[in-house]
Image (tube, grey):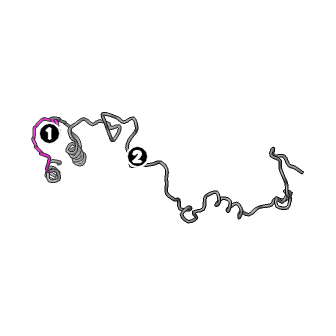
Amino acid sequence: DFVEREVIDFARRNPGVVIYVNSRPCCVPRVVAEYLNGAVREESIHCKSVEEISTLVQKLADQSGLDVIRIRKPFHTDNPSIQGQWHPFTNKPTTFSGLRPREVQDPAPAQDTVLRLSAVAPQILLPGWPDPLEDKLSFDPAGRRET
């Protein structure tokens, strides 16, 4: 069925593939793929449907004839670098010398900004705790309260 229905369509879709159909009596049906590098692959198509044969023939046409091997990495070099791979930021400076968005709006130093924020921050008084503004407490350098 594959020879009657699909071979002509396959040949039109793949003009770089040469197809020979040989009928041999008393033999198991098979597909033989011969590649330009000299590799030959034979696949039996006994008891397979038309769709299975179509996918098998397309797979053989897409392959190069080399053995299928696992590729561990997408890159290879004979002289590996001990410094790692190159990327666009390899030779760029690591510090940012430009102004950050907050500094563009308010060029005051960051310390002044923090002090201004802390001076404006509301104070919450808890019951039973002394008011820091009314009760002038003093401490010695060791951290003990002076009375």
Dot in front, 2 or 1: 2
Callout 2 crowding tier (Cα within 10 Å): few <14, some 14–19, many ≥20: few
Looking at the image, which is closer to me, 20 or 127?
127
Circle 2 residue: 91
Q: Position of residue 1 (x, y in %)?
A: 17, 48
Residue at the spot 71% in from the left edge and 62% down from the top edge: 119
Looking at the image, which is closer to me, 112 or 45?
112
Query: Is residue 146 found inside the magenta-colored segment of the image?
Result: no
Residue at the spot 83% in from the left edge and 50% down from the top edge: 139
Q: Position of residue 117 (x, y in %)?
A: 67, 62
Q: Is residue 41 left or right of residue 144?
A: left
- Disc 2, SS: loop
Callout 1 crowding tier (Cα within 10 Å): few <14, some 14–19, many ≥20: few
Q: Are marks 2 and 1 in contact (CB under 8 Å)?
A: no
Query: Is residue 29 found inside the magenta-colored segment of the image?
Result: yes
Q: Is residue 139 left or right of residue 77?
A: right
Q: Is residue 73 left or right of residue 33?
A: right
Q: Position of residue 118 (x, y in %)?
A: 70, 60
Residue at the spot 24% in from the left edge and 48% down from the top edge: 51
Which mark, residue 47?
none
Most prominent secondary structure in the magenta stretch?
loop
Residue at the spot 14% in from the left edge and 48% down from the top edge: 16
Q: Is residue 2 above or below residue 121?
A: above
**Which residue is at the far right?**
147
Q: Gap between marks 2 and 1, in whole Å?
A: 45 Å
Circle 1 residue: 36
Q: Give the quadrant of residue 21.
A: top left
Looking at the image, which is closer to me, 57 or 133?
133
Please report whichever mark, 2 or 1, sits nearer to the chain's N-terminal start. Answer: 1
Task: Say what amino acid the circle numbered 1 marks.
Answer: Leu
Q: Position of residue 91 (x, y in %)?
A: 40, 46
Q: Which residues are magenta?
A: 15-37
